[in-house]
Amino acid sequence: MFKADSGAEGVRYKAQDKKMKIIKRIDIYLLRNFLGLFLATFFIAIFILLMQFMWMHVNDLVGKGIGVDVLAEFFIYAAASVVPLALPLAILLSSLISFGNLAEKFELTAMKAAGISLFRIMRPLAIAIAFLSVGAFFFSNNVLPKSQMKLWALIFSLRQKSPELQIPVGEFYDEISGYHIYVREKTRQGELLNIMIYDYSSGFENAKVMVADTGRLSTSADRRFLMLDLVQGESFENLDKQQQRATGTRKNIPYRRETFSHKRILIDFATDFNRLDESMLEDQHVSKNVAQLAHSIDSVRVESKIRSREQSDRLLTERYFNRENRHDLQLPVAKQTDNQFNPDSLWASMDVRQQRQVLMKAIENAQVYRDQVEYNSIVLEDSQRYIRKHEIELYRKFTLAFACLIFFFIGAPLGAIIRKGGLGAPVVISVIMFVIYYIIDNTGFKMAREALWPCWAGMWLSSFVLLPIGIFLTYKAATDSPLFNPEAWSIKAKQLLEKVKRKD
């Protein structure tokens, strides 16, 4: 009997060991398929979002004559900045395709038939996504602030750089500040023919117009100035405002005409690429990690409370609410009641001159006090806006990591339910879900930015909305619910119609 029991336990142990090996192989198989899809979709999402980001800043890049190294640096920093959007999208799409392929090939059905539940199938991928979420948090906390600071410093540097001088033919060129240049023709040697120049550098009232037969553009040796050499031309300078200011009349000649055979114009046109100091952006919310954001929020909040308390104390104690004691006006003695001036009797005891003096002084004091209150309110509002920006950035670092988990528990059950793999239905569903997430997240962000909602509520709004959806889809997938099966819905519709007919 003992030997028989030992043999049964040995068989049971071997069966369990065999089952564990099969499950481990399934885990490795799932991880291999998922990671391949994730890397592919992640880089595709990075590329698409990077192209969108470049399109938004195309004016900062095109026509500036910058080198390949600067462009490469811009691409690297921009790619890092779009990771918070690309990562949840890649997780959603890759999990949906992965489980859609498993369901479409009946591999998921075979696993369930072998006694493996959906939660056990999802467990290795859920652990991998959890580690990925932790990595996403550290990325947004340590890498993203530095890349954002470098990116915006580079963008501001590009915006200050003068454009590359490429004057088109047949249209006005207005990239030079204060000048509009029109060229009818250009030779292969770079000579400009039939030139017209509008010079607004001294203001529209003192505009100058120059025309010339030919001309040539060049830059100075230090590349700080643009030299325009004109040959055989005329210039017309508007003197209407100058003459009117000098004589007070408009009867003088309104312009000055000059004919020249050669004329050189020196224009301030710096073409060198000068980088801005990155330390200028160190106090911005995008360039801080969690510890720095929390420290800035606390310090500014304390300063704001102190300033608000000082303003309220000043309202109560200094020159407000009938508490001022003025000695600069010589007023007659008035009746007092309980050690307080009676304003009616005091006003009646004054003559017209004193009443006018008091009114003017009251208006002047009211304007001073109003300006002081408005200034304090602006300062306090700036502090509150500063706090809101930092709180939004603080919560964003946590919502990114949480969104990765939510999108996995939305994509994996959806793939198991719809049973479609490939790049057809999964891509469409992923785009729809991500657009919904983006709209909700952007709405919450704007509500928090405009102080309509608390910052935590605005930034966690998308998570609050999508988390129940993920739980619902996971439950439906685990119970094999025909959620997106049209045949099941048609059967239920027929049953409902039959019940209605029976009642009638």
Image (cartoon, grey):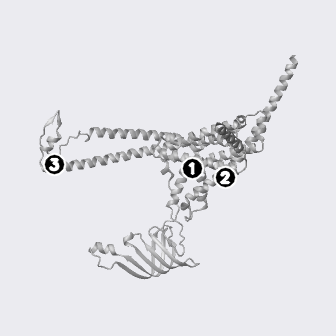
Q: Tell me where residue 287 appears, x and y as whole percent.
A: 52, 47
Picture residue at 63% right of the left edge, 52% below the top: 46
Q: Nearer the viewer, residue 403 or 477?
A: 477
Q: Which residue lies furthest to the front in this view?
A: 504
Q: Could you tell whether 308 is left or right of 57 in the image? A: left
Give the amino acid type for the residue marked by disc 2 in the picture: Ile
Q: Which amino acid does label 3 sit on?
A: Gln
How many C-alpha atoms fall within 10 Å of the one at disc 1: few (<14), some, or many (≥20)? many
Compared with residue 166, is residue 34 higher up or lower down, i.e. above or below? above
Distance from label 1 to label 2 (Cα)?
20 Å
Q: State which tag comes first along the sequence, 3 or 1.
A: 1
Earlier along the polypeptide chain: callout 1 or callout 2?
2
Above or below, comparing residue 437 to residue 118 in the picture: below
Q: Where is residue 351 in the image (x, y as percent from the top left)?
A: 11, 48
Query: Residue 412: image x %, image y %?
Result: 68, 41
Is 495 on the left or on the right of 67, as rendered? right
Q: Name the residue under label 2.
A: 44
Q: Quadrant of the C terminus?
A: top right
Residue on which the image places disc 1: 147
Asked whether residue 130 appears in the rendered view, the answer is no
As helix, strand or loop, the secondary structure at mark 2 comes to helix
Residue where numbered disc 3 is placed: 355
| Mark 3 and mark 2 residues within 8 Å of each other at the beta carbon | no
Amino acid carrying mark 1 in the image: Ser
Percent coordinates x, y for residue 473 in the rendering: 65, 39
Element marked by disc 3 = helix
Task: Name the residue rendered at 45%, 72% in the picture.
Answer: 266
Nearer-the-camera pick, 212 or 116: 116
Mark 1 lies on a secondary structure that is helix
Residue 422 shows in the view: yes
Instruction: Assess whether mark 1 and mark 3 are in contact (beta carbons under 8 angstroms).
Output: no
